[in-house]
Each structure stands twice: as structure tokens, then as C-alpha cells.
Amino acid sequence: AAGVIQSPRHLIKEKRETATLKCYPIPRHDTVYWYQQGPGQDPQFLISFYEKMQSDKGSIPDRFSAQQFSDYHSELNMSSLELGDSALYFCASSPLNLDNYGYTFGSGTRLTVV
Amino acid sequence: GDSVTQMEGPVTLSEEAFLTINCTYTATGYPSLFWYVQYPGEGLQLLLKATKADDKGSNKGFEATYRKETTSFHLEKGSVQVSDSAVYFCALSDRNQGGKLIFGQGTELSVKP
């Protein structure tokens, strides 16, 4: 079965550079979520999209932005990177009716800022 | 706001021991509850879920019951294996509040042979 695809798997950037993370949700899943997981931490919600519109916003820095495209894939753009941005970034997708399906997470993108 | 609290780890058990990882939640609405497992270097995998009070989620020998009266969703397994060693996250989601997952801090489980 198709899963949530994230790319790249690993990314190394220098401070003040820009990074773009991509997420391809499961077909027919209409909602995409982005989470950030620091070392030894629980995942923290960043932002979500429902039917290509931003639906909720969490603790996402102003330096970050995201969007969902017409094919439902989503991109997280991160500018002016800081050392503290080093983390595992997860994307998850879900259908509208959680009772039957629930969320599916991608394998994540590990971002290292040096 | 909504929150999830898990028992602190790490938890170290011998193979075939009984496992309980406590999870309690605070929510203003009627959330769905989840347990996720994360193996070293990997992503989050859904272990089990429950969407309403008294529902029992189960998978791979793990069980958890949604207890509204005690606002709890404790994870149990009767006989753990070395392969169960991982970090376990309890989480909740309320569709009326955007549907995002709110995680507990995670509990690391280490099972020794």
C-alpha cells in the first residue's frame, strides 16, 4: 500500500541557509500535518492543511512557511536556518473521517544545521 | 489547552514480563486517543487507537482502553519481547480543534533477553 513519502531523508545545511522539505500524502487523504521532533523530544505540531488551505497553525517560527499544492503534496520552506532547527521533521496525512483510518506518518526528514 | 502526560522512562524489563505504560490526558472536548511507537532512527508507527469512551484498541499483543472517568489510556502487554524495545508515545486528537496530534513526552522501553 502507498505510504506517506517525504524527501529528502537527510539534509545538511549551514546556518542562515534555506531548506525545502517535501511531503507526498496517501492518495485521497485530504489533510496534511507537519511536525518537528527535536533530539529526545516528542513531536511538536507545526502546521496543517486541509484541501490545500491552511487549517491550523502551531509553534511554527515566522522563518518557516508551508503550502499544499493542487496535487496535494506539501512543502515546508525554512529560511535563515539556525542550529536549533536541527531536528526530525515529520509529515502525516489523514482522511476526514478519523474513526476508520487515523493518521499515517512519513519516515521523516532529518535536518542537520551546521 | 489539551495535553498528554506519560510515565517517565526509561523502562527496563526482562523478556516475557508484563508491561504497563501510563498515559493520562486533559481535553476540553471528546478526543480520539492513540499510541504510536518509534524504533531507533525510524518514523512514528500507529500501534493502536480508540475513538470513544470504553473503546479498547489492540494490536500485536498491546492493548489500551479509553477511560473517560479517569482520563486515561494506559498501554499494556502481557509478555514483552526484545523486539518491543522502542519509544512509545501516547497522543490525542480532537477534530473539533483542528485534528492535530498532541503527544506525550514519550516513554523509552528497553527489553532485555
Image (spheres, rainbow, N blue to C red):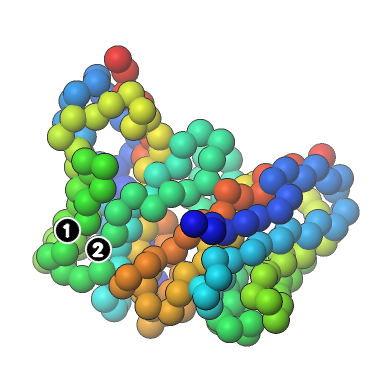
For the residue pair B69 and B64, the one nearer the viewer reads as B64
Q: Amino acid at mark 2?
A: Ala
Q: Residue at x 83, y 46 (%)?
A: A13
Q: Residue at x 36, y 58 (%)?
A: B91
- Which residue is identified by label 2? B50
Q: Residue B85, position in %: x, y?
A: 37, 30
Circle on res. B56: 1
Chain of residue at mark 2 = B
Q: Is residue A24 above or below residue B96?
A: above
The answer to whether residue A59 is seen in the rendering is: no
* Chain of residue at mark 1: B
Left or right of B58 on screen, residue A2? right
- What x and y, as percent, mark residue A7? 71, 53
The amino acid type of the residue labelled 1 equals: Lys
Does residue A96 sit above or below A114 in this rendering?
below
The secondary structure type at the circle numbered 2 is strand
Residue nearest the observer in this picture, A89 or B58: B58
